[in-house]
Amino acid sequence: MDTPDGFKAELIRGKIVVSPFSALRYLRPMRALRKQIEAHAPKGHFAETSPFLFSFPTAERAYGPDLFVADEASFGEEGRHADGAALSLVAEFTSLSTKDADWNEKLDVYGRLVPVYLVVDMQDSEITCFWDPSPHGYRSRTTVSFSEPLHVPEPFDFAIDTTGF
């Protein structure tokens, strides 16, 4: 799907949702987070902020995360949707237009499959790490304010420095 300049599209509950790209002030925390995560990514996985869609067939949804870590081998296929099972981490940076989906719909879908989900709440200046997915959603979570370190569990096992967020 071709979107207007400055917008991205995601498939949420069978509907195409078009939202604007992130505000300029999001670049520094996104870049800092990507660099830190990339240094600790599992072997064969890479961290990226490029706009790619990941499908979750059991939930009939596809999301284009703000930042993701995925198995590089999953990008050798034809098509426009990567398999959500290739993800080892997803991070969403909240905005007024996406905050509800980041905290609810995406949390529910990611919580059944993706090992680590980070919600970078730009409005409340906090970052939350969810981990230990199950058929009922994530079993564990930790929230810290920006400027405090946040531990990211296996398969990453390191602390994010959030002072620049």
Image (cartoon, rainbow, N blue to C red):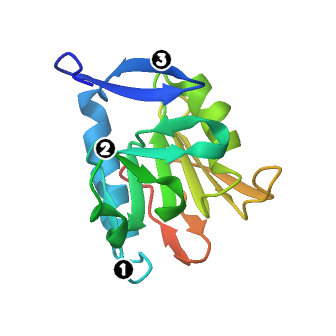
Task: Give the CA distance from mark 1 to mark 3.
Answer: 33 Å
Task: Give the CA distance from mark 1 to mark 2.
Answer: 21 Å
**What number is the disc on residue 80?**
2
Q: Nearer the viewer, residue 63 or 159?
A: 63
Secondary element under disc 3, as helix, strand or loop, is: loop
Task: Give the CA distance from mark 2 to mark 3.
Answer: 24 Å
Choose top left, top right, bottom left or bottom right for residue 21.
top left
Secondary element under disc 1, as helix, strand or loop, is: loop
Choose top left, top right, bottom left or bottom right for residue 8.
top left
The x and y percentages for residue 3 are: 24, 20
The x and y percentages for residue 79 are: 30, 47
The x and y percentages for residue 160 are: 47, 65
The x and y percentages for residue 164 are: 35, 51
Residue drawn at the location 47% of the way across and 17% of the way down: 97
Residue drawn at the location 62% of the way across and 72% of the way down: 153
Q: Is residue 135 visible?
A: yes
Q: Nearer the viewer, residue 100 or 109?
A: 109
| Residue type at tag 1 | Gly
Label pair 1/2, CB-CB below 8 angstroms: no
Q: Quadrant of the N terminus?
A: top left
Q: Which residue is mark 1?
A: 44
Q: Nearer the viewer, mark 2 or mark 3?
A: 2
Question: In terms of sequence position, does the residue under pointer 1 or pointer 3 come before the other?
Answer: 1
| Residue type at tag 3 | Ser
Q: Which residue is mark 3?
A: 97
| Residue type at tag 2 | Arg
